[in-house]
Image: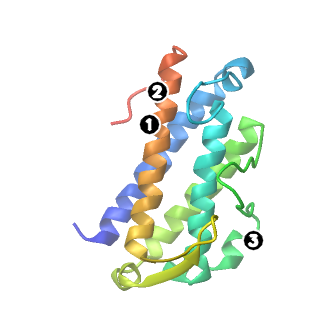
Amino acid sequence: MSLIKNFRMLSRYNKRVNAQLMACCLSLPLDVIEQETHSFFPNIISYWNHILFDDLILLGRLASNEIGQLKLKDLAKLPSPKSPHDIYHNNLSELASLRLQVDELIDYYCIHLTENDCEKFITYTTTEGDSITKAVADVMQHMFNHQTHHRGQLTCVLSQFGVDYGCMD
C-alpha cells in the first residue's frame, strides 16, 4: 500500500474512532469526566486536550512548510499549541467541536498529500527548544501513532471506570 493510501485510511479511521470515543465520553456524567484517573493525565478531559495538542502542533509544523496544500491560514481559527499540558477547553462539548474541526483538517490534509510531499523533510523546533529534521512521512506516522497511544490509555481509563466504549474494530 502506498504511503498516501495508508495516511488516507488512517485519517478516516482516526476520525471515526475519535467520534466514537468522544460520543461515549459525552454521554458520561460530569463527575466521571472530571474523576481523577491516577494515570498519565489527571482526567478524561486532559486526555482529549493532550491529543489535540499534538495534532495542532504537528499540523502547524506541516503548514509552516506548506505540505499537502496545508497553510498556516488553515489553522488561524484553531488554538495555538504551546505545551503538552495545554487546556483548550474544560467543557467536553466544546472539546468535541474542536476535535471534529481538527479531524476534518487532518482529513483535508491527507486527501491533498502527495507521495512527493511524504518524501520531503521539514525542520522545526520542539517545545523543549531542540531543532529536529524529519521526513514528512515520519511526522504523519507519529501523529497517528500518538493518537492511537493516548486513545489506548483513554480506553483503559474508561474500562476501569466501568464504561463500555464499544468496539474499535
Under circle 2, the secondary element is helix
Please, is residue 156 above or below residue 79 in the view? above
Please, is residue 28 above or below residue 134 in the view? above
To which residue does mark 1 refer?
Answer: 152
Please, is residue 64 above or below residue 21 in the view? below
Please, is residue 151 above or below residue 13 in the view? above
- Residue type at numbered disc 2: Cys
- N-term-proximal mark, 3 vs 2: 3
Q: 86 or 26, which is in the foreground?
A: 86
Tell me the quarter of the image containing the C terminus: top left
CB within 8 Å, label 1 to label 3: no
Under circle 1, the secondary element is helix
* Residue in view at x 73 percent, y 18 percent: 31
Is any atom of residue 163 visible in this view?
no
- Residue type at numbered disc 1: Gly
Which percent across, then down, holds residue 48?
62, 42
* Residue in view at x 43 percent, y 26 percent: 166
Q: 67 or 166, which is in the foreground?
A: 67
Looking at the image, residue 88 sits to the left or right of residue 149; the answer is right
The mark found on residue 76 in the picture is: 3
Which percent across, then down, holds residue 154?
52, 33
Label 3 Cα crowd, 10 Å radius (few <14 / some 14-19 / many 20+): few
Distance in Å between CA atoms under marks 1 and 3: 30 Å
Is any atom of residue 108 visible in this view?
yes
Distance in Å between CA atoms under marks 3 and 2: 34 Å
Among all residues in the image, which is located at the extreme top?
Answer: 162
Distance in Å between CA atoms under marks 2 and 1: 6 Å
Quadrant in the picture for residue 142: bottom left
- Residue type at numbered disc 3: Ala
Which percent across, then down, holds residue 138?
39, 69
The mark found on residue 156 in the picture is: 2
Label 2 Cα crowd, 10 Å radius (few <14 / some 14-19 / many 20+): some
